[in-house]
Amino acid sequence: MFSSRFHWDAPHNRLTELLAAKRAQGAPILDLTQSNPTRAGFVYPDALRHAFDSPGVLRYDPAPAGAMAARLAVAEYYWQRGHAVEPARILLTASTSEGYSYLFKLLADPGDEVLVPRPSYPLFEYLARMESIVVRQYPLDYHGGWTIDLDALSRAVTERTRAVVLVNPNNPTGSYVKRGELEALTLLAAEHGIALISDEVFADYAFAADARRVTSLAGVDECAAFAMSGLSKIAGLPQMKLGWIVVAGPAGVRAEAMERLEWIADTYLSVGTPVQCAAARLLEYGADVQRQIRERTAANLAFARQALAGTALETLAVEGGWSVTVRVPRVRTEEEWCLELLKRDNVLVQPGYFYDFENEAFLIASLLTEPTEFQAGIARIAG
């Protein structure tokens, strides 16, 4: 009697079973998978608690694209980063996940395809199935740094392809799209009449400057393009539930896309009034949380590189984001590595196959982890 859009009977894997058993025994786990900033020991400004102190939260004025004051705040966020984005090109959502669902509805019919990077965060398959569309993967290659395999991506385009998804920077590889790659992608998209979707939630977390890097697709005008971000990552405020889509591309396509997106958003009207009223202050106060995150992730990355230098383990090049990838000897599978670390050392990391790494063996650790826990966990991995 239920929809076949999604398989609800996914079995537990051995790692989650062992973790549950360890926690039931009260074992002190060094959790190097922490991705929730509100549980990672950051100090949130007291002012955040007063951000909703506005009479506007008591009045409901539904606006499909979002309240103008909130869209102006998002436009200011881009202006501060060198991108001129008019509020008329911004549509608010409750999250980037909802943004994906809106864009998949906008661009694709059931059975159509979207191309997504491999490796990447294991979310696209679920979101796509909910919209009855198909995910096809294109590879990211590693040769001392990550690059998009543009030839493979081009070969993956079919008559059913509707969009190419970019995660910029990628999660977990931390690799940014480069200018040469974007030029090739916009040409490909324009030629085939498909769109680019850029998930930019980690864009503010670069570890060093790089003139080759693309920080946002908000200024693309050669093809239809959509840049997404939100408070969850850029301000460390996942509980506030505010994201957005910036619509880019040729003027005519942009206008039609925005009109259709407003129709979709009007169907749901999911973004809460209080968070829209508070958007400007949340972005302002969240800047301090972002600073703390940037400092911690940089320090944890430096520690991992130093601790693993000279060992049989290698930290792969990472440009930004909240994760570090460690290549380990292929003397056992990734799952066996993770099970052994958890069983022997009470250290929890994620295997590369969780993120669809094409080959083994890789471990993923979160740079968001509290420093003492991160350092102890990495030291045990190195030992």
Image: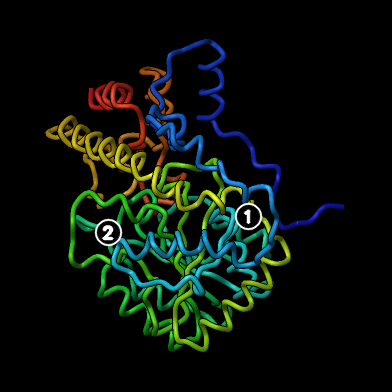
Viewed as shown, does residue 169 lie left or right of 192?
left
Nearest to the observer: residue 287 or residue 299: 287
Quarter where residue 85 is shown: bottom left
Q: Earlier in the sequence, mark 2 or mark 1?
A: 2
Q: Badge 1: how crowded within 10 Å, few (<14), some, or many (20+)?
A: many
Q: Amino acid at mark 2?
A: Trp
Q: Amino acid at mark 1?
A: Val
Quarter where residue 341 is shown: top left
The spot of residue 59 in percent (x, y) is: 69, 53
Q: Badge 2: how crowded within 10 Å, few (<14), some, or many (20+)?
A: many
Q: Which mark is residue 2?
A: none
Residue that carries the numbered disc 2 in the rendered image? 146
- Residue occupying the far left of the picture: 310
Asked if residue 361 shows in the view, the reply is no
Q: Residue at x 36, y 35 (%)?
A: 368
Viewed as shown, does residue 111 lie left or right of 298?
right
Q: Residue at x 43, y 89 (%)?
A: 191
- Residue occupying the far front of the picture: 55
Nearest to the observer: residue 56 or residue 291: 56
Viewed as shown, does residue 325 lie left or right of 334?
left
Q: Is residue 245 above or below residue 59?
A: below
Quarter where residue 12 is shown: top right
Kindly state the secondary structure of the residue where label 2 is placed.
strand
Q: Residue at x 32, y 53 (%)?
A: 204
Q: Residue at x 51, y 23 (%)?
A: 19
Kindly state the secondary structure of the residue where label 1 is placed.
loop
Q: Which mark is residue 271?
A: 1
